Image (spheres, grey):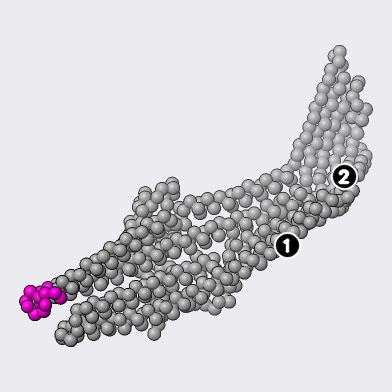
Amino acid sequence: MTVPSVRLAVVAVGLIFSAATVLAQTVTLQDFLAAVERAHPALRAAQFEPELAEAEIRNALGGFDPVLKSLYEYKDKSGTDKVNSLDASVELPLDVLFGPRIKAGYSRGIGFQVDPERSTTVPGEASIGVTLPLFQGIFTDARRNTLRKAYLRPELAQAQFRQERNNLLRAAAFAYWSWSEAERYVAIADTLLDLAQLRLSQITRRARAGEIAVIDSVEMAQEVLRRQGERFRALRTAEAARIDASIFLWTPDGGAVDLVGSAEALPESALPLAEEADYLRQARTLRPEIVRADVLQQTARLDQDLAREFMRPFIEAEAALISYDVGAGFTPDVKFGLRVNQPLLFRSAGARQQVADITVQRADLQRTLIERNVDADVRNAVIAARRALERVDVATTEVRLARQMVDAEARRLAAGEANLLTVNLRERFYAEALLRLASAQADAVRAFVLLRWSTASL
């Protein structure tokens, strides 16, 4: 006997939106999820993440923008220049090994009371040189570290968006199939009520003709009322499920959408299950939680590398070619300097490295924990799908046998060999079997939704 199928995506029948209403005869899962993804506020908010990542990269790149500095000072005394000085420079940091900074400068200092250290010829002096660290900052520094981390931000933003999307579509698909399941219950209640009403009309005619006791029509009328009550309860459940599903639908301007129509029927043909190992590999590759953990690990290691740099002495060398008289042509001289700025005990640097090492260890442990949880999600989904399909198989057989019993009792009643109570009970058992089959099919399709969520393939 074949296992009834669980099918998560079908060819669209039509999901047509007006300003605030979905008008369709059948709303398919594919179109429902497409509508959810198109306008849901949670996803629209998550779509800003890539823009924020781009802004962070631009901000980090700004640390390598050329910087212009200038200072002009003028003092006059009795119509004579006391101080007339100009200092201007352009500095360009480079994102390369050693993190050098190229600097071009011009200065002019004239006047009878100008600082002799700042005094120049009237044309002024010009210089061009480079500054680079000799120990601390060779491999990375705060500026380069910020840029490296910013380059990881788009991947983190994409993972965040995919996680939001994956979780949202899982919740929406669950709500959709709950709606479909509730509508199946209504259909079952309608079928049972139609059978009871048909039998009531037949029994009433026979009672009026004196062929059977009048009390039989009373008993059948009571059964009709009981089934009407069950139908009203099923209708209320279906209406609530439809409202719950419509919560996921929004208009582009943030308005509510009323879901009108019917859900597609619970599937009756099976999607074969792949090997669990295949799902595990797919989840390890695609689950956004793992991607986020990987980015956080890389970020922590970048901070660790930076912290290690601070454990080295800060010694910076500066070399430049300088022309003391711009008006005399380019006759360069050499300027060289050495700057040391380093706390002697390295306590702050040591504490910083300790914190960075702990952060890396935490990121590694968090990655291990996330991978374990992802594996558990996949295994639970696979088990749920297998058990649900087994339930569908059993429930299908039960429905077939229950239907045979109903038909047999109906024939016995027509031949006068059974009573009405037995037939009604058989039909109730048949209804319960139909409900169990619908429940198993709904659980199966939800299990496949969970499986697709666990492998990030929704």
Q: Helix, strand or loop at disc 2?
A: loop
Q: Nearer the viewer, residue 153 or 201?
A: 201
Tell me the quarter of the image containing the N terminus. bottom left
- Occupied quadrant, residue 409: bottom left
Q: Which mark is residue 341?
A: 2
Crowdedness near tag 1: few (<14), some (14–19) or many (≥20) residues, C-alpha within 10 Å: some
Residue type, mark 1 in image: Gln
Give the x, y percent position of residue 153.
64, 54
Q: Earlier in the sequence, mark 2 or mark 1?
A: 2
Q: Main secondary structure of the magenta part?
A: helix
Q: Helix, strand or loop at disc 1?
A: helix
Inspect this view and state whether residue 315 appears: no
Q: Nearer the viewer, residue 292 or 231?
A: 231
Q: Nearer the viewer, residue 41 or 147?
A: 41
Q: Residue at x 34, y 62 (%)?
A: 237
Crowdedness near tag 2: few (<14), some (14–19) or many (≥20) residues, C-alpha within 10 Å: few
The residue that disc 1 covers is: 361
The answer to whether residue 453 is magenta is no
Q: Nearer the viewer, residue 176 or 87?
A: 176
Report the side of 424 relative to 265 (left or right). Answer: left
Give the x, y percent position of residue 230.
28, 67
Q: Residue at x 63, y 47 (%)?
A: 55
Q: Residue at x 7, y 78 (%)?
A: 210
Q: CA distance from mark 2 to mark 1?
A: 31 Å
Report the side of 268 relative to 68 (left or right). Answer: left
Q: Bounds of the magenta span?
A: 204-216
- Report how many numbered discs are placed on residues in the image: 2
Q: Residue at x 91, y 20 (%)?
A: 112
Residue type, mark 2 in image: Asn
402, above or below 296, in the image: below
Asked if the residues shown at circle 2 and circle 1 are in contact, with their CB atoms under 8 angstroms apart, the answer is no
